[in-house]
Amino acid sequence: MPASHTTELFGLIVENIGGGELLVILLLALVVLGPDRIPEMAKGAGRLIH
């Protein structure tokens, strides 16, 4: 997938997520991944989006 398409898709997703939904997603990530892996995954997601 080209980077521009990925960025557009990410923008559409972020525009449609509210604060409560984002909080639930972050809490689920914390439970599933654990506190040690969250920064590592966030760094990977940032590279994917960029």
Image (cartoon, grey):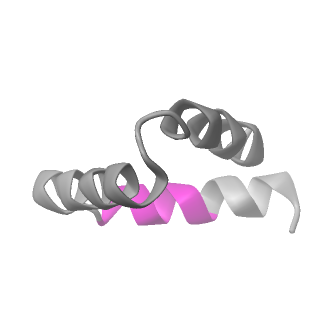
Which of the pair 24/31 is nearer the observer?
31
Which of the pair 1/22 is nearer the observer?
22
Q: Position of residue 41 (x, y in %)?
A: 61, 43
User: Which residue is at a point 57% across and 38% down the rendered structure image?
Assistant: 42
Q: Is residue 23 left or right of residue 28?
A: left
The C terminus - image quarter: top right
The secondary structure that dominates the magenta segment is helix
Q: Position of residue 20 (x, y in %)?
A: 11, 57
Q: Quadrant of residue 28?
A: bottom left
Q: Is residue 44 left or right of residue 19?
A: right
Q: Position of residue 22 (x, y in %)?
A: 25, 54
Furthest-left residue in this view: 20
Q: Quadrant of residue 24?
A: bottom left
Magenta-drawn stretch contains 13 = yes
As drawn, 6 above or below 39: below
Magenta-drawn stretch contains 18 = no
As drawn, 34 above or below 36: below
The N terminus - image quarter: bottom right
Which of the pair 21/31 is nearer the observer?
31
User: Which residue is at a point 50% across and 33% down the rendered structure image?
Assistant: 36
Q: Is residue 25 left or right of residue 34?
A: left
Q: Is residue 33 left or right of residue 49?
A: left
Q: Which residues are magenta?
A: 9-16
User: Which residue is at a point 65% across and 45% down the rendered structure image?
Assistant: 45
User: Which residue is at a point 25% across and 53% down the rendered structure image?
Assistant: 27
As drawn, 43 above or below 29: above
